[in-house]
Amino acid sequence: MTVPIHYFLVLAAALFATGAVGFLVRRNLLILLMSIELMLNGVNLTLVAFNRLYPANHAGQLLAFFVIAIAAAEAAVGLAIVLAFFRLRGSVRSDEATALKH
Amino acid sequence: MEQLQLQFPSSDFSLLALILLLPLVGAFVNGVFGKRLGNQGVRAMALTAVGGSFLLCLVAFAMLVAAPHGHGHTATRFTWNAWRWFTIDGGTSAVPLDVAFSIDPLSGVMMLVVTGIGFLIHLYSTAYMKADPGYYRFFAYLNLFIFSMLVLVLGDNLAVLFVGWEGVGLCSYLLIGFWFNDEKKSSAGKKAFIANRIGDFGLLVAMAMLVYYAGTLRFSTLEESHASLGQMRQLWPIAGLELPSWLIPTEPIRASVPTLVALALFVGCIGKSAQLPLYVWLPDAMAGPTPVSALIHAATMVTAGIYLVARTSFIFVQSPFAMAVVAGIGALTAVFAATIAFAQTDLKKVLAYSTISQLGYMFIGVGSGAFAAGFFHVLTHAFFKGCLFLCAGSVIHAMHHVIHDEEQSQDMRKMGGLRKHMPITHATFLISCLAIAGCPMTSGFFSKDEVLFKAFSSQIITAQKGLWVAPAWYGQAIYALGVIGAVCTAFYMFRAYFLTFWGEFRGWTIVKQAKKAHGHHAHDAHHEGEPLRGQAPHESPWQMTLPLAVLAVFALFGGLVYAEPLHLTALERFWHPVFATASTHVVERAGAHGMMLPLLFVGAAIFAVGTGAAYVVYVVKNGQPAAAFVSAMPGLHRIVRDKWRIDELYQATILGFFDALGETAVAMDKWLIDGVIARATAGIVQVFGAILRLLQTGRVQVYAASMVLGTAGIAWFALAPHATAELDSSKLRSNGELIFTAAPGHGYAYRWAEGDAAMPSEFGSKAVFTTQVDRCATKTVRLEVKNVFGSTTETKFTPCREMGNNCCARIAPSPQASTTQPVKVAPVEGSR
């Protein structure tokens, strides 16, 4: 018995949507980073699910590994930015980060 | 000589390169390094450049004289082709233009005049401009002028001539406005430049016409093929234009090509040679230094117009109308300018109007077909008028030592009795005065007499009937005007002479032991009314008197090269090949034979009357009759003194019009462009900026939200089905066939139905659907599309078969109103 593909896809979409909504509505920078991780993992789940459907050269799994590596790097940079921002403003609230306006 | 001829063969006469290059190098060195060279260096450079050029001209001229004469009617011509300039493509053939120079008897003589008199005036200027801070600049311009004038004279085709023509115009402008700190002088320069531009436009038009009709601008080629120009062209009506018949007659106006070309060329001559109605710049040009007036505005540049007419004589003689215009304008100018000269008190202004008047005589000459005589007057005029101007400069130089005022030191009322103080200037002025007044046996007598005799006796004949044929009395009328002008000339020139050199000195009180005259440039202000005291006016240094003497000798004896009454016609024979083509069109008028001697006495009488009257009025009666005349007719005197108020007339009409145009443009710029368009543009940008500024919050999450929205929009578009179709209506008009091609999409399936018929139950893969449309009828076609997710959409097309009589609009006022998809209108077919 195999789990049908759309089970995975629905779960991945739910994960991605949770991450996206979280990214849009939350104000804590750490939560935002976590939301990004959620979205990335949603994508990863899609990739490996399709890899199961088309396993010829394992492109999906390879891509998922790349995403995980990039996500690690992104998390490191993101946390460093959050740290620097905290030192600057004394808070980690995203609505205080408006310097992009200028 | 043989060695030279071997070195410089007539078809590759590169000696001209040296002649041209020397003044150019002089101009370059003086202009760029002049300030560091110092006055000595500048003087050496300028004199070497022009003097060397003159010597080489002498060599070239000697070779020209010694060259074996071409057989038949062709003039000896030495040509140097420098390089291919460019080629005018288009039309039936390409017209090549070379930077080519040549000398023939005509340009050879002119070249000698330019460099010879140019050298004398350079020498003169070394003393005249001695204390001027712009010394190097002056000589750079003067050398550049010599170069440009040589290009003008030596140019082998009209295009090269035009380069020189513009070059001398530029130098004239630079030198008139030489003292550019004085606003009046710099605007005089501008006036000269602009008046010349009007003429130059005519020259450009003439060049364009020659390229179009003759396919060449080379003088020699034009002369060979001159007869082929004689077509008639319709001037009006043109290109189907129609104007009311009361404005312009309905019968076609036709003119021959030579007439059009000659008139356009003559417009250029009017500008450059200061004829009516463009003469106004020349009197103002006297604002420049006096040597400039002598060289450019008397001896050489202003005669370029006569040179051009003589050069293209073979075109002019083909059009009796153009010739009549040339002679008529010349005669009118000769008299008109002479009348103005009566009332001028400024010595240079008298000479300026006299120059305009004499240029009129030259045009009488060339306009009567007497090209040799007309151009001979150019030559003699260069001598005596150059000399007169230099004398005036010498006088002004002397006057300026005490009267440090530009206008007053040129005022003849301040002069008088100068013959005792300036003997050489006096003698040379007198000789030149005799020459210009036409004293028998002087150069001016022979040239003016020849011009007037030819005007009286010549007639132009051509095969074609032009716009207008001059009546038989036209020649006599020109002659009569010429005689009147000549009497005036003799009178006003001797008026100037007597006022300047005779009687008592009126400039200042002469004190024997007066303190040394202050430096030339100590322009300390003299108080009004305070009587001036100073030393006696003194004779100028040798650099100034030597050119005077040389020119005076030529003014006295120069006429002997072409003195027809004495049967000395060396110059005429020398020039004959140049005007050979033209002279076939000039015949002696019936009844003019044997009139030479009687008219000679008329010429002598002119001199006697004019000079005698001046002597009586200004010496015997000491100016009483003139004063009486002024008090009797103050209005007339004032208007003549104000130069017939022509400048004011131009100011009121043409310049006023352009001023008004300018004012309108300024108002448009201020209110419409700046006020409305610029503000509206800024306002729109501002509004959009304000809206966009709201979106730029600087918060990453807002940006992310817009990204999500955009992505969602694209996703929706990609997932929804779209029922669109391309209509191929190329056969719609001919057989009513209309082909629909539905747009492809991922997993699309289609079904089609015509009219109100029910859709087929199944979707298919048929994306192309063909239908027939009746004439002037609409047809409804429905397309339903299902995409891969199973959602469907439907579109209704109602094309109409237009038959070219707009019937679709009639049967259904808005046939496309009900469609959800706009239908492309059938493209109009080539055949009906």
Image (cartoon, rainbow, N blue to C red):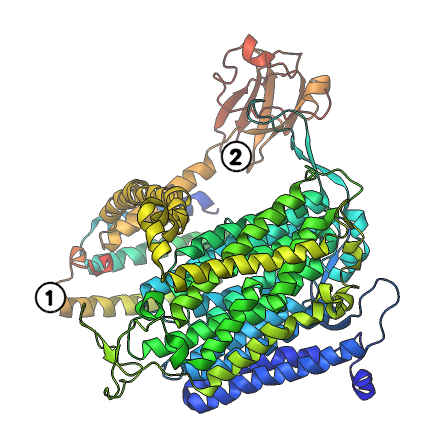
Question: Residue visible at 80% across and 48% down?
Answer: B228
Q: Which mark is residue B788?
A: 2
- Residue B18 screen position, x and y as percent: 66, 81
- Residue B785 screen position, x and y as percent: 54, 27
Of the 4 image quadrants, the one containing the C terminus of chain B is top right
Q: Which mark is residue A90?
A: 1
The amino acid sitting under disc 2 is Val
Judge whether residue B100 can be spotted in this image.
no
Q: Helix, strand, or loop for circle 2?
A: loop
Residue farthest to the top, as pictured? B811
Of the 4 image quadrants, the one containing the N terminus of chain B is bottom right
Chain ID at mark 1: A
- What is the tally of numbered marks visible in this picture? 2
Task: Choose mark 2 or mark 1, whichever is in front.
Answer: 1
Judge whether residue B365 can be spotted in this image.
yes
Specify few, some or many for label 1: CA neighbours under 10 Å numbering under 14, 14-19, or 20 or more: few
In this view, the residue in front, B535 or B283, is: B535
Q: Does mark 1 fall on the same chain as mark 2? A: no
* Quarter of the view holding residue B768: top right
Q: Which mark is residue B325?
A: none
* In the image, residue B466 above or below residue B808: below
Chain ID at mark 2: B
In the displayed structure, does residue A100 sit left or right of residue B186? left
Give the CA distance from mark 2 to mark 1: 53 Å
- Residue B803 screen position, x and y as percent: 66, 15
Question: Residue visible at 70% across and 39% down?
Answer: B472
In the displayed structure, does residue B142 sit left or right of residue B256? left
Q: Helix, strand, or loop for circle 1?
A: loop
* Quarter of the view holding residue B668: top left
- Residue B267 screen position, x and y as percent: 58, 50
